[in-house]
Amino acid sequence: MNESDIKKNYIKKIKEFKKHNKLYFEDNSPIISDKEYDQIKKEIINLEKKFSYLNSSSSPSISLGYAPSKNFIKFKHRVKMLSLSNAFEIEDLNNFEKKIFNYLNQEIEVEYSVEPKIDGISASLTYKNGLLVTGTSRGDGSTGEVITENLKTIKDIPQKITFKDFPKDIDIRGEVFIKKKDFNELKDNFANPRNAASGSLRQKNPKETKKIPLNFIAYTYGYFESENIKYQSDFLKSLKRWGFKTNDHNKVLKTIKDLEIFHKKFENERFDLEYDVDGLVYKVNSLEVQKRLGFTANSPRWAIAHKFSADSAYSQITDINIQVGRTGALTPVARIKPVNIGGVVVSNATLHNEDEIIRKDIRLGDTVKVERAGDVIPHVVLVDLKKRKKSSKKFVFPKKCPCGFDTIKEFNKITKKYDAVRRCPDRGFECEKIAVEKIKHFISKEALNIDGLGKKVVEKFWDLNLIRYPQDIFNLDYAKISKLVGWGDLSVSNLKYSIDQSKKVSLDRFIYSIGIRHIGIENSKLLAEYTKSIANFLNFITNKNFNEFLNIDGIGETQINSLKIFFENKSNYSIIEKLSSLLNISDIKKNKDGKLLNVTFMITGKLVDMSRAEAKSLIEENSGSVVSTINKKLKYLIIGDKPTTRKVQQAKELGIKIISQKEWISLLD
Ligand code: IVH
């Protein structure tokens, strides 16, 4: 699925979720069971975990129950609850200080109150004569929701304060959050601890809030009149004395250089904390100077949040597991203590391969830096050697696959080196780990594209012994499946239907679906175009005529070798034979009368509402072709969003026509 399909699917699920919420909470007449309702919630949350760009405000990970704001009384804050501007680089900090000097029109020596920025949600507590009278959420900053009863369930929030110097009328503000270890037990229901805290706090029923262990750390005030307190750091001390929890890591620092040093140190240590921290807040310590500086529309001039880099974090390796891929590659995966990286809780990170482990000397128990970019699998960047225990031992990479077979490292004739990757040699479905992965590949979108038979279902069917080989998919025991939890008559008949539909497949997709190493989508197309029909393809294989494929432009030694190894194996061969009799494999007829005959294209940048693969097949359906290198033969370069500048430059130099997605589509009409 491409991004737009994923979004569509997500929105569909959110709509469904909202519909059932209304039926349950507003109409009091649910039409699905709690279990089915939980399933929808889980699906939405799983999608959010996988694709960080999915973040509907109606998500169950944010709004538990039904539109909480409707359930709460509105409250206009006496003093607005503003946000903070962000700094990412030292440059931003220097600018922040410069602006302060400019505003004050003088260079003063500034002292900063430095406070960890806990990633939770803020709340305001109004105390009158020492009694907690109202507790509110931030809302839009001007108006919040009254959630007093929910806040009262938090043990860190004092309800009565008898200290003589406690102001008669004051709003205490701070962060409500959930500890990492507590989140661990709730992680199936929420995308991250912040959402868990927010969802819990805005529950209609305070009893529900009480079930989730929330914490409160106080850090500032809203409405408050006092002549006595002169520094933010003193206010924090008073808060502690009055019975509030304050952050143990709060401190006072003087220069930007000191802030920078502390930030670096804290960024590495933060994973040891019990809660998620996404940066440090620096506040001008003198309340008098704060008053002079005042606010811009959204944030105070006297404070800034210095964020940690969003896409990396430190955590500790608790285990190293070996995963086996479709091609037999053994990939070591580090299980790490869950850590929030840019809003996503990460608990696994790839270690790539044996050589990488040796090169970085990664060991069990090590504290490591984990990086996450976009939706790719998080990976371990480096080890913090200072944190390594004396007793730690080098990690010994297993020489056997979990299936029991000896693994090998292949010798690469071109680089004249052994591969970095250790593999379980393909023995044709004998290694169970490889076999499951092969079946997953067989049903995948670019292969047979069997909707309703996702990777998880394949794993389940495998565990239940319902499938061992790809051909078993066409002989499923539906009576048994319909009795499984989560499978109703409708889902079984949908599955049957999509399996039936998948039987009609083009030769190139079929070749790809077999999952021969080095024969990806492109090479499958080349082989299909050359052999033309499944009968012919099988002939080539039976006669071991592999070397003839060397005639195909694009197919080389590596591919030929891989084909040879694959078909030397009798079980592989018999699977292909069985499949070819079960499926309706269509011949390749190159469309020779399309509008784009003999026209070559190249695509750079992101297209609107269309994946690259989709664009490519559209071009090919119209007899055109897509190339991957720029040369004089190229006719059009199609430009999407954020194109590669180098490609555009090259195209210009060679006088190649540069067109937009719209212009390209108009060529088809
Ligand atoms: S001061 C006007 N101090 O960060 C001052 N905020 O973007 C604003 N936060 O909504 C608040 N730790 O939820 C302050 N020590 C701290 C904080 C903190 C976390 C959050 C708070 C606020 C957001 C500002």
Image (spheres, rainbow, N blue to C red):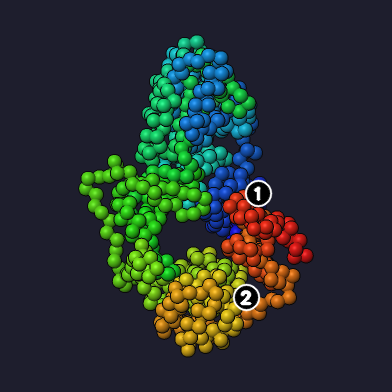
Query: Residue 572 at what x, y percent from top left?
Result: 44, 81
Query: Residue 274 at what x, y percent from top left?
Result: 39, 39
Above-or-below relation of 140 to 27: above
Q: Please tell me in which quadrant of the rendered image residue 13 appears.
A: bottom right
Q: Secondary structure at mark 1?
A: helix
Residue linked to disc 1: 22
Q: Residue at x 51, y 86 (%)?
A: 540
Q: Residue at x 47, y 11 (%)?
A: 228
Query: Residue 325 at what x, y percent from top left?
Result: 42, 66
Q: Quadrant of the C terminus?
A: bottom right
Q: Does residue 382 show up?
A: yes
Q: Is residue 324 left or right of residue 523?
A: left
Residue linked to disc 2: 501
Q: Residue at x 56, y 53 (%)?
A: 44
Counting residues from the N terminus, which is met first, the one under dot 2 or under dot 1? 1
Q: Nearer the viewer, mark 2 or mark 1?
A: 2
Above-or-below relation of 382 to 274: below
